[in-house]
Amino acid sequence: MLMQAMLLLRAIAGWICIIGGAVLTISPLPFGFVIVIAGVALLGPRDRGLRWLHARWHRLLSAGSTSSMPLIAHLAQRIHTFQHTVEHKARRWLAARATSRTGGTPLAAEETSRQ
């Protein structure tokens, strides 16, 4: 019961951080982006709403990159390229971190060797 309450409070705090950070992103101070990242970290990768929001973001970028207005298309393509680069570097960093923790073998290889 206590664990469920903690998970609910964590989810509420995560969404408050994401919404508040999105509002603060338009301010001249760069704190909004940091608050959004904290909210995403609180929710975690398995949150259903966060996965839905991520899919909608990709759909919005793909629709924007095929826009008939050159400025919108160019901005959407640049954002998509930047996001792809950041995600790729994050995956490589996580893979290297997982490999170093297992003594040189990837986690997937270690799990299959145990079975």
Image (cartoon, rainbow, N blue to C red):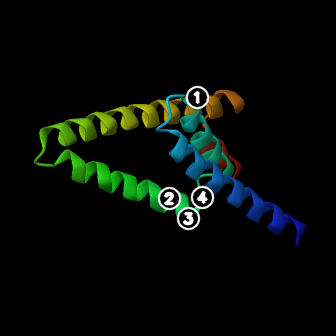
Outermost residue, front direction?
27
Residue 21 point in image, percent of width and height: 57, 44
Question: Which residue corresponds to the image point at 38% horizontal and 52% vertical from the top-left?
Answer: 57
User: What residue sits right under mark 4 in the picture?
Assistant: 46
Marks 1 and 2, Cα distance to the nearest angstrom? 24 Å
Q: Quadrant of the C terminus?
A: bottom right
Marks 3 and 2, Cα distance to the nearest angstrom? 5 Å
Of the image marks 4 and 2, the number of the one nearer the N terminus: 4
Which label sits on residue 48? 3
| Foreground: disc 1 or disc 4 | 4
Which label sits on residue 96? 1
Q: What amino acid is found at the position of numbered circle 3 in the picture?
A: Arg
**Is 94 or 48 nearer to us in this picture?**
48
Q: What amino acid is found at the position of numbered circle 2 in the picture?
A: Arg
Disc 4 and disc 2 in contact, CB within 8 angstroms: yes
Of the image marks 1 and 4, the number of the one nearer the N terminus: 4
Q: Does residue 17 appear in the picture of this structure?
A: yes
Marks 3 and 4, Cα distance to the nearest angstrom? 6 Å
Which label sits on residue 51? 2
Disc 3 and disc 2 in contact, CB within 8 angstroms: yes
Question: Which residue corresponds to the image point at 13% horizontal and 44% vertical from the top-left?
Answer: 69
Residue 22 point in image, percent of width and height: 51, 46
Q: What amino acid is found at the position of numbered circle 1 in the picture?
A: Ala
**Is 98 or 111 nearer to us in this picture?**
98
